[in-house]
Image: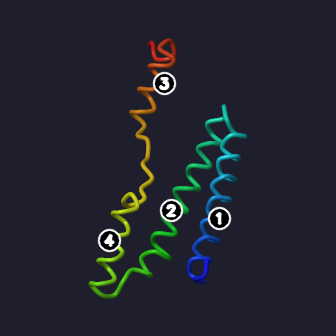
Amino acid sequence: MDNPTEFDSQARSNQLEFLAEKVLTLAKTAEGNPLEILAVLRILEQLHQDIRESFFQQSLPDNRQKLYHLLREIESKGGWPYIPRSSLNSVMENLQKEFPELMQE
């Protein structure tokens, strides 16, 4: 790691891995409690939105060459980060599959 940028990138990567482990541990401790897990998911979704709107959009490139480089990077590393939301219908369908007796009228 001769390049300071490479070191910074590795340090950030380590920090992100640490945070991911902490979030997963938190979710595991809430296993079996859908409300607690839902709270974790809501916080992650809010963080995603806050980071995207506050930091990411402000840091977008101001010329075509930099924008092209960013788009190539996004494409080569797996696309745009997206946090999908479960629809209430899909939750109900899964509940009906798991617990058909609950859905009888």
Q: CA distance from mark 4 to mark 1?
A: 24 Å
Callout 1 crowding tier (Cα within 10 Å): few <14, some 14–19, many ≥20 = few
Discs 4/2, front: 4
> Badge 1 is on which residue?
14
Q: Position of residue 87 (x, y in %)?
A: 40, 40
Image quarter (top left, top right, bottom left or bottom right) of the N terminus: bottom right
Q: Secondary structure at mark 2?
A: helix
Q: CA distance from mark 1 to mark 3?
A: 38 Å
Q: Which mark is residue 71?
A: 4
Q: CA distance from mark 4 to mark 2?
A: 19 Å
> Badge 3 is on which residue?
95
Q: Secondary structure at mark 4?
A: helix
Going from N to C along the chain, the mark reached first, 4 or 2, is 2
Q: Position of residue 33 (x, y in %)?
A: 66, 35
Discs 2/3, front: 2
Discs 3/4, front: 4
Q: Secondary structure at mark 1?
A: helix
Q: Is residue 46 left or right of residue 35?
A: left
> Badge 2 is on which residue?
48
Give, as a three-letter code, the residue at label 4.
Leu
Going from N to C along the chain, the mark reached first, 4 or 1, is 1
Callout 2 crowding tier (Cα within 10 Å): few <14, some 14–19, many ≥20 = some
Q: Is residue 99 left or right of residue 70?
A: right
Q: Secondary structure at mark 3?
A: helix
Give, as a three-letter code, the residue at label 3.
Leu
Q: Is residue 93 left or right of residue 7?
A: left
State the residue at coordinates (68%, 59%).
Answer: 18
State the residue at coordinates (51%, 17%).
Answer: 99
Q: CA distance from mark 2 to mark 1?
A: 19 Å
Q: CA distance from mark 3 to mark 4?
A: 40 Å
Q: Which mark is residue 83?
A: none
